[in-house]
Amino acid sequence: MGGSLMNSVRRAVLVVFAIANLPCISAQAQMTPEGGELVDFIAAEQQRGSVLTYAQTYVDDENEKVSYKGTLYAGIHHFRLDECKVTVRVAIQDTYSGAIEHRNFGRVHSEQTGELRDDTVYEYRFGLGELGADAVHALSAVPAQLNIHTIVRCEEDRSCNLSWIQITAPNSGIAETRTVNGIQDIDSKAKAIVLPMASPETAAQAAKLFSVAIRACSVNASAHK
């Protein structure tokens, strides 16, 4: 796929995603000032999202070479802070196409896949007051949708890293659901989750604001005991 065509696909993915997943930020008036600052920051972050334009190759279980080119979008598209209770949804949209090389009696036949798309939505629910002071950290990592055991390269970052914040809860205190292409396949408790950020700088700022809100919620929880 040529560069101009890939850029067109990339723009189309963002337009479709933006229309289908309009940002949703809500909060109650009782939230702390620290919580309001966090909500405002996430609202701005929702307008950005993260994009990777990638090329990936590997040999499948039938010893056939598979090659893909695609665009992966990651972003927060719902964030609700109800006093100190958080509900957040993260959407990952992967649009790609490629070819599979079939070998028969020394001949190679290339089968084109056509354009494919996978939509994954994660929903997390947790209480800020139940988290520790050091529960949130900024990090860089490859999205789970891109298999690090394959040969994969990205235009935006050669290693295909995106920026995230990791939130860790004691006793697996985060409720998590995952829906892939409209079918829910996970409904469980998680000890740690990650939320996508547009850049290392915004990830660092989000981690700081989460930590401030966690401390405020912890103080409020102690005061009401």
Image: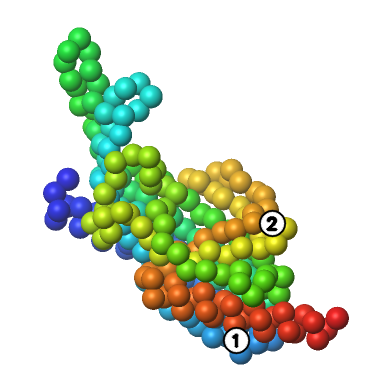
Dot placed on the residue nearer the N-terminal end, 2 or 1: 1
At 29% from the left and 45% from the top, the residue drawn is 152
**Badge 1: few (under 14), some or many (20 or more) residues near its Cα, within 10 Å?**
some
Q: In front: 184, or 129?
A: 129
At 19% from the left and 22% from the top, the residue drawn is 109
At 29% from the left and 41% from the top, the residue drawn is 151
Q: Amino acid at mark 1?
A: Glu
Q: Amino acid at mark 2?
A: Ser
Point out the image quarter for the C terminus. Answer: bottom right
Residue at the farthest right position: 225
Q: Position of residue 91 (x, y in %)?
A: 47, 58
- Tell me the tag on residue 109: none
Q: Position of residue 112 (x, y in %)?
A: 24, 32
Q: Which residue matches tag 1?
A: 34
- Label 2 to label 1: alpha-carbon separation: 25 Å
Residue 172, quarter of the rendered image: bottom right
Point out the image quarter for the N terminus. Answer: top left
Q: In front: 7, or 136?
A: 136
Task: Relative to 223, say whether 104 is above or below.
Answer: above
- Tell me the tag on residue 172: 2
Mark 1 element type: helix
